[in-house]
Amino acid sequence: MLSIIIPTLNEENYLPFLLESIKNQDFKDYEIIVADAGSHDKTREIAKNFGCKVVSGGLPAKGRNEGTKFSRGNLGKSPKILAVKLFPADCRQKEETKGQNSPEAIYFCF
């Protein structure tokens, strides 16, 4: 299973697009954990409606770390965790980073 961790703060305008995109992928052996930093909008409600596990988090490193505490990712020999960072529509750069002891980070631009 792949654990997808999404740190959020007031992401009601972007989160549905990301979750719908993940849902439409062929790969289905995943869980989504939304690590929310105290949103005052409908972020948590949207995440729950998509079947995500919602936990208290922070931005962005704290959210990733908090989310991993609840993850069940276990593809291969070591835990597999994908952390996702949302950027607003004016984002122009896509990045992929890998660290020896950190999860892969994929940045989605809307």
Image: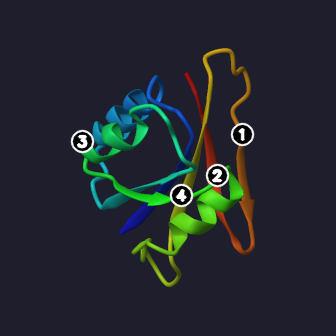
* Secondary structure of residue under mark 1: loop
Quarter of the rendering containing residue 104: bottom right
Residues packed near mark 4 inside 10 Å, few (<14), some (14 to 19) or many (20 plus):
some
Disc on the earlier residue, 4 or 3: 3
Q: Amino acid at mark 3?
A: Asn
Residues packed near mark 3 inside 10 Å, few (<14), some (14 to 19) or many (20 plus):
few
Q: Is residue 61 above or below residue 95?
A: below
The image's mark for residue 95 is 1
Taking depth in this image into account, of 48 and 91 the one nearest to the observer is 48
Q: Are marks 1 and 2 in contact (CB under 8 Å)?
A: yes
Coordinates of residue 61 in the picture (x, y in percent): 70, 58
Quarter of the rendering containing residue 53: bottom left
For disc 4, the marked residue is 82
Q: Amino acid at mark 1?
A: Glu
Residue at (72% x, 20% y) in the render: 92
Q: Amino acid at mark 2?
A: Ala
Taking depth in this image into account, of 97 and 67 the one nearest to the observer is 67
Residue at (64% x, 52% y) in the render: 105
Q: Are marks 4 and 1 in contact (CB under 8 Å)?
A: no
Disc on the earlier residue, 1 or 2: 1
For disc 2, the marked residue is 105
Q: Is residue 77 above or below residue 3?
A: below
> How does the figure colour the protein chain or chains?
rainbow
Quarter of the rendering containing residue 45: top left
* Residue farthest toward the bottom in the current orientation of the protein: 77
